Amino acid sequence: MMAGTPTRVLSALGRGLASQFTPRMLALLVLPFLVAIGFWVVSAWFLWDPVTGWFQTVVFQGDGWMARGYRSIAPFGLAGLSTWVPNLFAFLLLVPIAIATALALIALLAMPVVIRHLGRETYPDLARQGSLALGANLWNVLRSLVVFIAGYLLTMPLWLIPPLALIVPWLWWGWLTARLMRFDSLVEHASTLERQRLIRSDRRAFLLLGLAVALLNYIPPLFLVAPVLSALVFAHYSLSRLREQRTLGAPASVEAI
């Protein structure tokens, strides 16, 4: 890992937290709340009944071994399993997908506001050599969401091991946050070459930042702050690293992965 990474990560976290309490960034907190509520309502309205119905049919009906096992224990006061287990499954499936989609939209909608705010207030000397790159941005979001959703679902059986029930989702949330935020935090100021080199050289640092802010998802109501705070933290880290790279007059070194 490159020298100074822990210091840079901690510095970005501290500066991001300080920036969160500015009036403009506090007002921006309304956006993730509205987006998240919107996705939860849409998911519950259109998907909850189909998902719970499908799960109930597959698990509790027919001649499969799980259905036979359920019928053998239902007379012992466990008949309610056929109701609350499908609801739990739907919750574990739909809520993360809704939050992940909301996080992706926040990366698209809130990050430009954050970048322009910090560009004026903290990094006015940093020239913009990038562009909006909407196509590349959307491709990064779609590809990241597909990998996240597939990986999240495939690793759900690991949740049966108590410690992993917390660790595995946290790793996926950290990975998704890093994938979305590192691109969006650089796209306006860094040229394509600068962005690619910085993402490669600081890949581990970006993941550490993602894991750090992903912890907020476990602390209600701080998970409502997580999207904007993540944008601020990644913006501070990326722009300060870009400034450092340009000051040194050489591209960031590419570390082996």
Image (cartoon, rainbow, N blue to C red):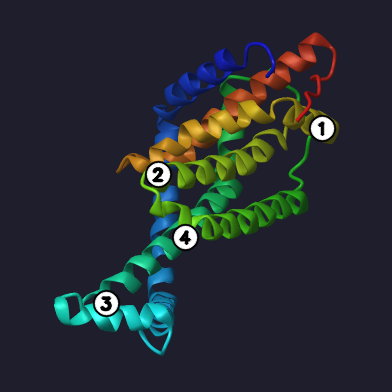
- Asked whether, in this view, residue 134 is left or right of residue 13, the answer is right
Ranked by sequence position, the earlier of labels 4 and 2 is 4
Closest to the camera, between mark 1 and mark 4, is 4
- Inter-mark Cα distance, 1 to 2: 38 Å
Element under disc 3: helix
Residue 191 circle label? 1
Please tell me which residue is depicted at 38% across the width and 71% down the height of the picture.
44
Residue 226 on image: x %, y %: 43, 39
Residue 51 on image: x %, y %: 43, 77
Residue 166 circle label? 2
Ranked by sequence position, the earlier of labels 3 and 2 is 3
Query: In the rendered image of this protein, does residue 15 appear above or below residue 225?
Result: above
Residue 98 circle label? 4
Ranked by sequence position, the earlier of labels 1 and 2 is 2
**Amino acid type at mark 3:** Thr
Residue 21 on image: x %, y %: 39, 27
Please identify the quarter of the rendering in which residue 39 is found: bottom left
- Asked whether, in this view, residue 137 is left or right of residue 176, the answer is right
Query: In the rendered image of this protein, does residue 95 appear above or below residue 124?
Result: below
Closest to the camera, between mark 4 and mark 2, is 2
Closest to the camera, between mark 1 and mark 2, is 2
Task: Using the rendered image of the protein, determine whether residue 129 is visible from the camera's viewpoint.
Answer: no
Element under disc 2: helix
- Asked whether, in this view, residue 168 is left or right of residue 241, the answer is left
Task: Using the rendered image of the protein, determine whether residue 214 is visible from the camera's viewpoint.
Answer: yes
Residue that mark 3 sits on: 83
**Amino acid type at mark 2:** Leu
Q: Quadrant of the N terminus?
A: top right
Please identify the quarter of the rendering in which residue 37 is found: bottom left
